[in-house]
Image (cartoon, rainbow, N blue to C red):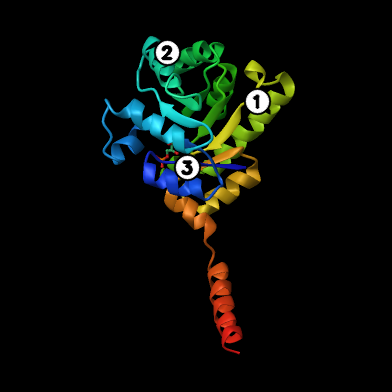
Amino acid sequence: MKFFLDTADLAQIEEAASWGAVAGVTTNPTLYARIGGTVSDFPKHIARICACIDGPVSAEAVGSTRDEIIREGRELAAIAPNVVVKIPTMIEGLAATRVLANEGIRVNMTLCFSVPQALLAARSGARYVSPFVGRFDDIAEDGIEQLSSIVDALDNYVFAEGGPNGEEIEVIAASIRSAQHVTQAALIGADIATVPFDVLKKCVEHPLTARGLAAFAKDWEKVSQA
Ligand code: E4P
């Protein structure tokens, strides 16, 4: 499973990219608002993110009609070759995805909460689909169970029919809240987990690693004094 970083914060992206293990970035309007972004700076900000990460960068279209989404999608895709257009799972979004996919523009279908939605995303030509895990948990439902069903259903789909546009759709486990979610997503067979910066850091840390490091440092001091 690959790791994407779920943020629009450039400092976090630069830092995480330097760790060498992050394969892409996902953003959304909320994450962009959180860093104080403006509409006029949005294309430049996406370009800055694209320049510091060697992998797909999802930038979300905010239009509500297919024509608006198609126009935005083309504009976003023109920013950099690694832009992926993020489009919400809805009728207008599916229609726009089909048009953009036919033009070779990669789409990440977002706000996906069910198997039928994920299958329709695949049928419309989306390159990625993003089932949200944590938002299910927020309403006392099991987000990991939904993710698991979506991974299974898409495996059946790809096995039976082959992916659209000759590429298999990849499942991005999104709305990830913890290292435990990351573990579960990996075991289920999600292709990617997109994680906030603090969760990524927690994935690196372990109390036994910290304890082991302290012991090694202490023993090395003894060696150095001998
Ligand atoms: C996915 O790409 C979204 O940006 C994200 O994971 C949303 O997560 P949230 O539920 O933490 O807002």
Q: Which residue is mark 2?
A: 70
Q: Residue 11, relative to residue 209: is it above or below? A: above
Alpha carbon separation for disc pair 1 and 3: 21 Å
Image coords of residue 165 (percent x, y)? 63, 16
Closer to us: 180 or 8: 8
Image coords of residue 123 (percent x, y)? 59, 17
Q: Which residue is mark 1?
A: 168
Characterize the local packing of mark 1: few (<14), some (14-19) or many (20 or more) Cα atoms within 10 angstroms.
Answer: some
Is mark 2 in CB contact (under 8 Å) with mark 3?
no
Residue 112 in sight in this render: no
Work out whether mark 1 precedes mark 2 in sequence or the reverse, and give the earlier one: 2
Three-letter amino acid code at the position of disc 2: Ile
At a point 45% along the width and 32% down the height, the residue shown is 50
Image coords of residue 38 (percent x, y)? 26, 31
Three-letter amino acid code at the position of disc 3: Leu
Alpha carbon separation for disc pair 2 and 3: 25 Å
Characterize the local packing of mark 3: few (<14), some (14-19) or many (20 or more) Cα atoms within 10 angstroms.
Answer: many
Q: Which residue is mark 3?
A: 5
As helix, strand or loop, the secondary structure at mark 3 comes to strand
As helix, strand or loop, the secondary structure at mark 2 comes to helix
Tell me if 46 is positioned left or right of 224 in this view: left
Alpha carbon separation for disc pair 1 and 2: 22 Å
Residue 179 in sight in this render: yes
Three-letter amino acid code at the position of disc 1: Glu
Q: Give ligand 1's quarter of the image.
A: top left
